[in-house]
Amino acid sequence: MAIIIPKLTVAQAATIINAIITFLQYSIGLALVALLLYCIPPFNSANSWSVAARQVHTSLWPVILRRTHTYASTRVNFFSTLSLISALLVAICGIVVPLGLKQGPPVHSFFHPINASFIQDTSPLGLATSPRQDFKFGRICGGISQVLCPGNTPETINRTEIPPSVFETFSSTPHGPFNMEFRRYFINNGGYNFSMAKAQIGIVQSLILQEGIFAADGLIIDMTETPGIGFSNHTIPSLGDGSTWSQEMFWLEPVTTCVNTNLTIDYIRVDEFGVDNFNLTDRGGFANLTTEYPQLSRDGQNINLYEHAYKGAVLGNFFTMMGFNNMTRNESFVGKTYLLNRSSTSYTIGDMTTGDLSFLQNATLGDPDTSCRGFGGADNANITNVGVQCGGFAGPAQRTDGGDERIPSMNSTWTQSIHVCASTTRASIQTVTFTINSTRDLRDLQITRKISNTSVLWAVEKTDLMIRDVDLFWGHVVDKYESDPSLWTIRSNALYVPAGGSDSWGVTGAGQPSTVPAAAWAKVYALSSLSDFDYSGKTNFALLTKWQSLLAKNPETGNAQIRNLIWTDMVANSLVGTETHSTLVAASLEPSVTYDLRYAIPLLLLFIIWVPSFLASTFILVLGRLKVTYLRDFIDHTAVGRLALGDSALAPVDMRGGSEPVHLNEGSWRKAVGKTIVSFRSIINVRRSGGETFYDKVPKSPAASD
């Protein structure tokens, strides 16, 4: 049977219990002494009076009544007061000190290898994942007509199998293209009528509104400010009370930079769907347009996405300006508005439109052309031509009249900023740390990740094919391939994924899950063509609110963050990791407590008294300066029974040093009892020297044995 008491912590409950016990401890002593004095008969043996006196004097009654300290010496008063303070501090410590205790975080024991077992994901994403046994990697090459894939021979041009040498190279570590598979797939004819595993691209379970880092079937998904996905077929150590462990994980992350065009779309809401004064406003995009042609560095893996986005923004503004009757920058000014023709566009008010911004009077701002991406389909596929997607971006609608964005109203004014963004995919190896309690549920995993700055060897297939004809294999390989003539290699802590046919055509390559990131970027920059999920916020108001909050923090980084989160959601719904660990180096979790040192102040004061007292008493006892036999004699001869019978070694001494006892009359005993000098020093001195005591020489009376 248990009692449940709400609104109390364990420390608070322990404090209440200690307070009750302390109260009982002292109050029961007072009560029993009072009952003893009430019930004691007027005639008792000497030992009985000694026992009764001991009970009275060890209780709190002398402290409360303050009767014995009136005429005591300074030394006796000092140690008596110190004992009282110590007793009070002990009582206070018993009540206050436990309040500082709190449940601490779990701490891990030592790490050691331990068997791990697979854990099933029961979320919609996990339940929708296709079985793995029928999946098969493959590849076809040729965007317009079939060509020979890297590693194949002319005799194998009509085959889709990956050459063993290529498979061996990019399987030499678990951080490459063969560690990922399509989440959902079906076997059907791919390009050139080859039967292949094709991706079923779709949103099984949108994760866009989730926060933090969490696990899903085959993936670690990060939806924080630095989104991305890690690939792992989850296994958990077999430790019943919880455990923690770390894994080096293959990681893909979106990287985006956005540049403000300094153009906005502005309008007035007249009803739920209609608008008035639908204008493009020059915020400096036309009037302050640069006269210098934007440059784009060709530095391969040292990519500068800002240059890509800036070039797209400058050229987009220029062609948009030309669309208004070949207008020049001198004909515009900051704040000038241009009426837009809505009849020729399917633009929806508040829609987060990207890709197609044709309503901007012949604008090419949203066209991901070669000038912004930095490559074309006819360029050579290699490690230096990084897969970049570009496009214009009309951000979520933001209210400009001071009203609440969540409550649109008639005649409210709204604006949408236009940015040009450039995005790519970066591969890296990252350390992911897992902690789980005694359950076996992926939702209970606590996950943190740390970017590894360790430089590793990355490789990309070497070929002379055009980008539109091939999706190259890439990944982390072992060091023996560093000088392989069939590879481009680089030592770095990350690899920007090279451009391929999936970037040019915007589709996923059959049999090649590694093409999903590029195909996802193509969809991100053409949201109007997506029907799988409403990423614009047009029908998902929670999503719209999230987008608006990101823009409110920072328009440039907010726009980039929107792109990155959409890409992460798409890729997580399309890919699954297959790397499995049957053994993990893990540590079990053990409970701990934390303590607030403010509650230890009474204990500190008690230690200040205890430490010198304990050390000094130990010193005089160990060195024989005080003998235990003296303590026993002192107890015996200060007993009230011996004093009453005159059998005690205590004797009054004259102030002048005489040995004759002082005779007191009955009227002056109250005053004299506090001033008369009573000596026990002879026993102290003799006991210190180990000789015979005065008490040993006194004849024993028959009453002494009573």
Image: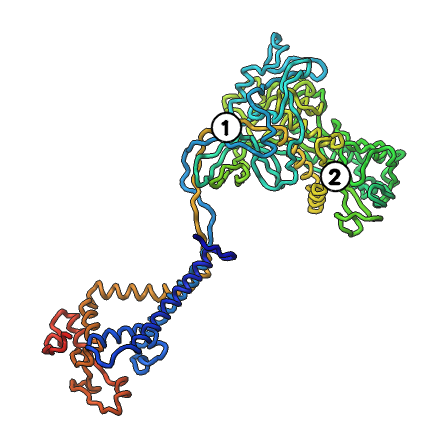
Please name the residue shown 84% across and 45% down the image: 271
Label 2 belongs to which residue? 539
Task: State which quadrant residue 215 falls in.
Answer: top right
Is any part of residue 75 visible from this angle? no
Q: Amino acid at mark 1?
A: Thr
Measured as percent of width and height from the top left, residue 265 is found at 81, 41
Task: State which quadrant residue 154 falls in.
Answer: top right
How far apart marks 1 and 2 lie (CA) works out to 39 Å
Measured as percent of width and height from the top left, residue 503 is found at 69, 25
What number of labels is visible? 2
Q: Residue furthest right?
A: 325
**Which of these two is toward me, 86 or 20?**
20
Is any part of residue 513 visible from this angle? yes
The reply, left or right, for residue 348 in relation to residue 623 is right
* Residue 622 sits above or below residue 634 on the image: above
Measured as percent of width and height from the top left, residue 357 is found at 80, 33
* Residue 165 sits above or below residue 444 on the image: above
Q: Amino acid at mark 2?
A: Thr
Q: Residue furthest front?
A: 1
Q: Residues within 10 Å of mark 2 (few under 14, many from 20)?
A: few
Label 1 belongs to which residue? 580
Task: State which quadrant residue 68 falls in.
Answer: bottom left
**Which of these two is toward me, 463 or 658?**
658
**Which of these two is toward me, 3 or 666?**
3
| Quadrant position of the C terminus in the picture | bottom left
**Label 2: which secondary element:** loop
The reply, left or right, for residue 502 in relation to residue 661 is right
